Amino acid sequence: MRQGHLCALAVLVALSGCKRPSSGPEMAPGAPVDGAPKVIDLDQGWSHADQDGASYASFGSKLVPKAWLLHLENPDGSPFIGDKGMGALGFLLQASPSAGNPDALPVGVTIAKDAAGHEWAGLGCAACHTGEVDYRGTRMRIDGGQALIDFDAFEGALIASLERVLGDDTSFLAFADAVGTPATGRDALRAEVASLRDKLQARHALNASPVPYGRGRLDAFGQIFNSVAVEFLGIPGNKRVPDAPVSYPVMWDASHLDLVQWNGSAPNAGPGPLLQNVTTALAVYGSLDVSGRDGLDGFPSSVDFNRLGDIQDWFYKLRAPAWPEEVLGALDDEAVARGSKVYASECSSCHALSDRNDPKRELKAVLTPVNEVGTDPRMVQNFLNGKVNTGPWQGRKTAVLAGPVLGAQAQSIDVVAHAAIGATLRHPLAAVHDAAVSWHTVYKAGIAQHPDYYKARPLSGIWASAPYLHNGSVPTLAELLKPPSERVAKFWVGGREFDPAAVGNEYGEGPDRTLLDTALPGNSNAGHAFGTQLSDAQKRDLLEYLKSL
């Protein structure tokens, strides 16, 4: 069987032809977003077909039956997918259907079919990697930008909506009618709703953290580790508290970098992007069957290998959003010129420049030791200290068919790699097609054995990337240029009104916002003191230059 896999892989590599997803002419800056006519697009290198495809492409996430999601209600009876539900939790709502989103679901809500042909709603890349900013009544879509969703609260709200269905006969019968369940099937429906609620409650409890994530942050590594080491392996003792939330990283240069993840732990040369996408697909309400299997022929999973290559290719095409002068005002060319000199002396050694108009740009990340950059170390520490029991995987090769053998205990990341590679081996033809479609030239980088640093990326589109630092602990670039002791200690996250002078979103208290307290563990706004000694005039010039990147 495995020999057959290898033969099939070799043939497909030769014949794949690297077919790309359909595209079309690039969107005109200022054009309305499909399905959201009150939101305008920026110049980011995508066509409407690219944007629509990337916004709703499923990698196999199955969270809740689609018919249920369309009819679930909040405790007050309002639609769960409406303004008072997912909208209040930071999801971007659509006003009308589009080709990729016929049900007008929020951005990033995807649809996948199970083996029986039933449609399931889940979350895709765009849920966490699409932003919007407002300025004086104009709303701008930031494709690949940082979302401001409250992931933890979303999960809790979904559980509450399922509990509403089960709360009394009136609510349940109304729901059963809405989803088209006949009287003979209602006992089964009630049991299915209760089962999903219980499953989500268990997941929610597994990933409970004493540090609130709030809007725009998630401990993705922590939750991925728990999904694999606890849920899939079935070892409750492997539970680790995911208490190091980080911001959702921007995507426009990610596919061009040699290393990704905030700690630079993942090389981006092929097949790295494929395995990273598989890992994400497993963690975001995916499934993996490891029972009674040696892994050599792969693990059955929910991952949709038919779309992973397309998703990667879309994001490779994406460009950083240029400063929209027609909305935010013209830049001061003289200040930009002065600021470029400040940048060269203060910033360029870590943050190399990237040409957003070069479609094949190859970029290198700079890795700065945690003790040098001085920012909150919890994310790095959790990654380095994460060890779990391997259980039935003890004695297996980390990469299933190759690599060192897993001991009784292993680094969490090695166990995750074993799961991702096992899922990939189950679908060799589709996986090679994905790898071919998403294969792009990047600088090669080795796997660090002890990644005790944070990654400094090119600052293209930095104006549209607030809040700042890896843990989102600084609201604006102006605050980041202050000495750490002078930075705002508490601020509210979730507002979208943009401040062109401070470069970031306004952060006062308001509805549907969450408080970020930098005194809490993992939330420190210390470190990154680079540029803080500049004069006020130099800081203004530097900010003007940063807007131009």
Image (tube, rainbow, N blue to C red):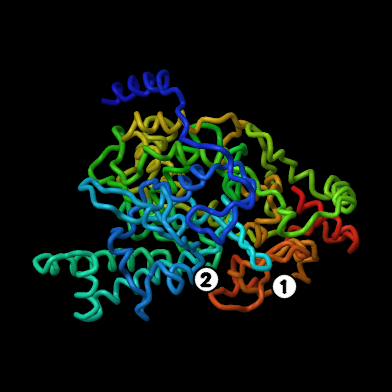
Q: Residue at x 68, y 70 (%)?
A: 506
Q: Nearer the viewer, residue 171 or 369?
A: 171
Which residue is drawn at the image coordinates 23% and 48% (left, top)? Answer: 117
Q: Residue at x 39, y 46 (%)?
A: 59
Q: Secondary structure at mark 1?
A: loop
Verify CB contact (< 8 Å) between mark 2 and mark 1. Answer: no
The quarter in which the N terminus is drawn is: top left
Measuring from the top left, give residue 199's x and y in whole percent.
29, 64
Residue designated by label 1:
488
Q: Amino acid at mark 1?
A: Val
Residue bearing the label numbered 2: 212
Rendered image quadrant of residue 81? bottom left
Image coordinates for residue 537, horizontal then vertical, percent: 90, 61
Q: CA distance from mark 2 to mark 1?
A: 18 Å
Q: Residue at x 83, y 49 (%)?
A: 343
Query: Up-down: is 526 above or below 161?
Result: above
Pick the residue in front: 235 or 529: 529
Q: Nearer the viewer, residue 491 or 115?
A: 115
**Residue 472 seen from this side:** no
Label 1 packing within 10 angstroms: few (<14), some (14-19), many (20+):
some
Q: Is residue 69 visible?
A: yes
Question: Residue 90 in the image: x percent, y percent?
Answer: 51, 66
Q: Residue furthest left?
A: 184
Dot 2, how many residues are within 10 Å of its Cα: few (below 14), some (14-19), or many (20+)?
many
Q: Earlier in the sequence, mark 2 or mark 1?
A: 2
**403 relative to 299, above or below:** above
**Amino acid type, residue under disc 2 in the picture:** Pro
Secondary structure, mark 2, is loop
The front one of 490 and 124 is 124
